[in-house]
Amino acid sequence: MSTVIAAIKLTIHGTGSGTCSLTGKEESDGLTVTFEDGTVKEVFLSWKGFRQLLGLKAGKAPPAKAATNGPPAPAPAK
């Protein structure tokens, strides 16, 4: 069994607090980063937003939330 690990290259410009560009949450602690692939350039991300973005870039989507609105709607008739 082999494991493939992709490198994620980024620059951390600084840490502090502000509004997260990913989640929109205001006054969060986090960091300002640039990803080498060009998807993010000098944006502030909360620590939670940063971890979410790293997970997405690593191919690990966050766990799906269970539906709480009852059973799924039936497929439309053709």
Image: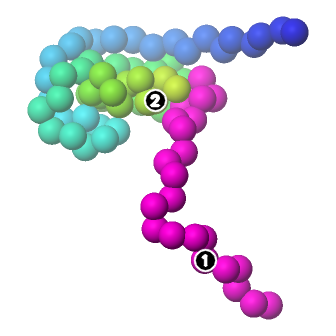
Q: How is the image coloured?
A: rainbow
Residue 31: image quadrant is top left
Q: Position of residue 69 (x, y in %)?
A: 46, 68
Query: In what quadrant of the picture does the C terminus appear?
Result: bottom right
Q: Is residue 60 magenta?
A: yes
Left or right: 44 as drawn, with respect to 60: left
Residue 18: image quadrant is top left
Left or right: 24 as drawn, with respect to 38: left
Range drawn in magenta: 56-78
Q: In the picture shown, does residue 52 fall above or below 31?
A: below
- Residue placed at 34% from the left, 20% from the top? 33
Q: Residues within 10 Å of mark 1 (few under 14, many from 20)?
A: few
The extreme bottom residue here reads: 78
Answer whether labels 1 and 2 touch (C-beta < 8 Å).
no
Magenta stretch, main secondary structure, is loop
Residue 44 visible from this viewpoint: yes
Q: Nearer the viewer, mark 1 or mark 2?
A: 1
* Residue at mark 1 to residue at mark 2: CA–CA distance: 31 Å
Determine which of the numbered discs, if any, sits on residue 73 in the image: 1
Q: Is residue 77 magenta?
A: yes
User: Mark 2 — residue?
Assistant: 53
- Residue placed at 67% from the left, 80% from the top? 74
Amino acid carrying label 1: it is Ala
Amino acid carrying label 2: it is Leu
Q: Secondary structure at mark 2?
A: helix
Residue sitting nearer the eye, 67 or 46:
67
Q: Position of residue 27 (x, y in %)?
A: 12, 32
Q: Secondary structure at mark 1?
A: loop
